[in-house]
Amino acid sequence: MEITQPQKKNRLTIYIIIAMMLGIITGYIIHHQSSAQTIQTFSNNIRLLTTIFLRLVQMIIAPLVFSTLVVGIAKLGDLTTVGRVGGKALLWFVSASLASLLLGMVLVNFFKPGAGIDLSYGDATGAKELIGKTQEFSLQKFVEHVVPKSVFESMANNEILQLVIFSIFFGVATASLGDWGKIVVRALEAISHVILKMVTYVMNFAPLGVFGAIAAVIATKGLEIFKFYGLYFGEFIIGIVLLWLLLLTVGFLVLGRRLRILIKRISGPLLIAFSTTSSEAVFPKLTEELERFGCKDKIVAFVLPLGYSFNLDGSMMYMTFASIAIAQAYGIHLDFGTQLTMLLVLMLTSKGIAGVPRASLVVVTATCAMFNIPAEGIALILPIDHFCDMFRTATNVLGNGLATSVVSKWENSLEH
């Protein structure tokens, strides 16, 4: 008997949950019954499963973004429509980012989680690696990161924002060519359908990727990590819950009862993002589910890639939360004006860094150095970061799903 699409989706979700449980159990056993060298070897090897899954996903992101975005822009038609849709998307992105940053700032000042962090628990090795990456954040590097030098280089490095800019130029040029442009659009539309079919095959590897990610981190850190960092983690989770409530409330005001259907549609991508800590891993699947929800393909193809660069709600909240918590751990007082300045700096430096590994921590490290907070303080939050990253990544995916759906509604392009 042929398996229907909903059955396949439910079965994959069950497999992912089972993989998470097995990962925790396996990691726990290895952590308590093996030597330090065995644990390190196990973690490095089992993490290869996650690497394989993520690389398979990354393999299809560039062609998918390019093909769907060019088709979307060409179907939107003229520059006026592109500007209008882009303007509405950016209105949501900026508003959501500011709300997320402000929420993080309010909560960290209320709870003061940094005051309870023991400086001796830091991960110095991981901190050195992150400090080494902070040189990327200058105005010149920011511009170089945004504006593509070569579309092939952008595709090779999965630089989504650079791909978006090239695709906008390409899409507008294609739309202006009339009949010649229609040939290109039809070809790219066919390519996008092929890539989306590949998504179905790649997603079958998701449970293995989830198992590898969870087993590796539990084997290395153990469950004891939650005892000491429980307060910091718990207060961050309160922030995530409040942010979800805020986003879902605004989403309900725009989408009404259809919000429940949207959440059901994107529950699979949310779970994969949560367990792999990679929003990239669900970009193709999220595209597919939003179109099934009723968003027009041209809106999804235009807004979603922009959201991946400009709309990182969970990461935004965590950046202010973590930066000020580190200052609290070192006993550094930041007045209200300084904190607002830090918020605006984070607003700027966080744009377009979605493809950077551990992007939130890299930005936090750079921001700490800018405000004379010891950059090595990042070591204090590294041991718990993987678990925080699970929640902020899922929140990023939720924010982008909502943004795309809301813009579709505003454009009267949401099918029932």
Image (cartoon, rainbow, N blue to C red):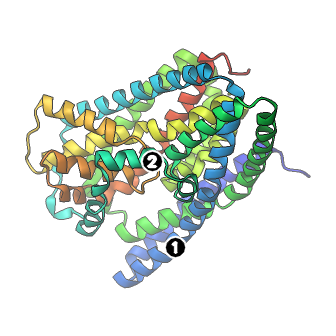
Image height of 310 relative to 283, above or below: above
Task: Determine the CA span between mark 1 and mark 2.
Answer: 25 Å
Image height of 93 relative to 286, above or below: above
Q: Does the rendering let one see residue 296? A: no
The quarter of the picture where residue 298 lies is: top right
Asked if the residue under mark 2 is in contact with the one under mark 1, i.e. CB atoms within 8 Å, the reply is no
Q: Left or right of 377: which side holds 273?
A: right
Q: Which residue is mark 2?
A: 354
Total count of labels: 2
What amino acid type should be assigned to the residue bearing mark 2? Answer: Ala
Q: Does the rendering let one see residue 189? A: yes
**Mark with earlier residue (1, 2):** 1
What amino acid type should be assigned to the residue bearing mark 1? Answer: Ile
Q: Which residue is mark 1?
A: 46
Q: What residue sits 19% from the left and 59% below the top?
A: 376
x and y, in percent, of residue 406 in the image: 57, 23
x and y, in percent, of residue 51 in the image: 54, 66
x and y, in percent, of residue 216 in the image: 45, 68
Q: Nearer the viewer, mark 1 or mark 2?
A: 2
Judging depth in this view, the residue of 274 and 63 nearest the camera is 63
The quarter of the picture where residue 206 lies is: bottom right
Q: Left or right of 185: which side holds 222?
A: left
